[in-house]
Image (cartoon, rainbow, N blue to C red):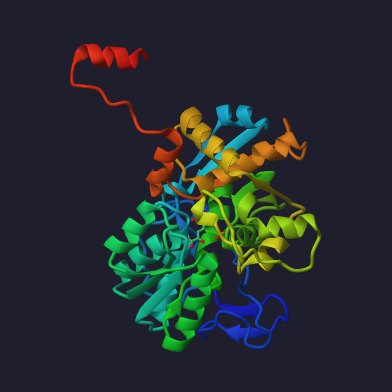
Amino acid sequence: MFPKSKLRCIKCKKEFNSDEVIYVCRSCGSLLEVVIEPPKVSLEDMADRPLGVWRYEEFLPVEEGSEIVTLREGGTPLYRCDRLAKWAGVKRLYIKYEGANPTGSFKDRGMTLGVTKAKSLGSKAVACASTGNTSASLSAYAARAGLTCYVLLPAEKVAMGKLAQALMHGAKVISVKGNFDDALKLVMELSVKMEIYLLNSVNPWRLEGQKTLAFEVIDQLGHVPEFVAVPMGNCGNISAIWKGFREFKSAGIIDRLPRMFGVQAEGAAPVINMLRKNLETLVPLSNPETLATAIRIGNPVNWPKAVMAIKESNGLYESVSDDEIVEAQRVIATLEGIGVEPASAASVAGVKRAVSKGMLGKKDEVVCVCTGHLLKDPEEVIKVCGRPVEIPPDLLAVSKALSGK
Ligand code: AN7
């Protein structure tokens, strides 16, 4: 049974019906969130269902009788990583590996909900701006649903794997000469003007799918982790995960909450800057820069929700350099066998950085959310690892090369 829901402005608290196509409060322009009644359900009640987004249907606000658009998202592994814990300097470290989703990122959790919603609202076309993964995911789910899909990408800054996905799944892909923030502004205007359903994370229904990551962590770990580290770009994911934990607590499934740890790349860290300076509002960056192109975002729309998540949870925040990101990416890959894209490694790099500052240490347990697959950005890998040595096809040359002579 799906729960009944409504939309509520996070600022002025004005409420709207769940079948209204709006992305921000009609009264004050702030972000909206979906509100559901906490269901009366236990983990045992849901235990026979496969691990994944739809296992938690009592928490997922879609219309009864909706045609669910799914590629079997979620149900991703939670790996205990002892070598990585030692490297970072914490007691326990787990990786929630979102690269194992159907299109290789956490975005699929949101798109199964978002595209199901688009269908039940009767939309014929969906759209997004994207640093890559959102477009890859939306293109696939739109194809699955038989909807037209438009994606606006920042020119030349989208990793090859992600672009390949959007193109092959048949989206109309447009390259905007500007950055992600420019593309998002355009697509928001476009969606209103042309009545195309917008599926960036400003759309609160998407976050309803993404909150299931929190549910899975509780199911897999068997207890509430102390810290959950999340890379932040547009700040939807950390907000969604925090909402998930809060809803499990309201439903009486857990009795305490984790502390959220938001991590941004140094060159694209407007939220971290704001928190450090204790500012009331975000100062957007006009030229965000980082090798982690997924989180190369200067004006994150969901910043108020992310700031709430970090503050309410008595959480942590840090920025990490590109060098730290690449180092973490390599260590995750070589010590644990887990392949993640640069943005994903920011969560792990953030833990190491926090340890060096004494914010985390030998007593702490952290779940790091690794948001996307290594193969999303093969060009970055070649850039940081170099190409393999080339040899003529003979045995002597092979043995020489293998012994490094
Ligand atoms: C791998 O695809 O914004 O803080 O347009 O692809 O919820 O934005 C991607 C974001 C982290 C940040 N890790 O999540 C997009 C886009 C990866 C990502 C983030 C993204 P949010």
Question: 285 or 37: nearer the eye?
Answer: 285
Residue 194 position, x and y percent, is 42, 87
Question: 390 or 308: nearer the eye?
Answer: 390
Residue 175 position, x and y percent, is 39, 68
Residue 188 against residue 100 in the figure, above or below: below
Residue 50 against residue 400 in the figure, above or below: below
Using the rendered image of the protein, determine whether residue 38 is visible from the camera's viewpoint.
yes
Tell me which residue sits at (42%, 59%) in the image. 156
**Is 5 situated left or right of 388 in this image?**
right
Residue 102 position, x and y percent, is 37, 54
Residue 171 against residue 9 in the figure, above or below: above
Residue 381 position, x and y percent, is 42, 40
Tell me which residue sits at (64%, 50%) in the image. 266
Tell me which residue sits at (57%, 44%) in the image. 322
**As drawn, which residue projects farthest toward the right?**
278
Using the rendered image of the protein, determine whether residue 249 is visible from the camera's viewpoint.
no
Question: 254 or 389: nearer the eye?
Answer: 389
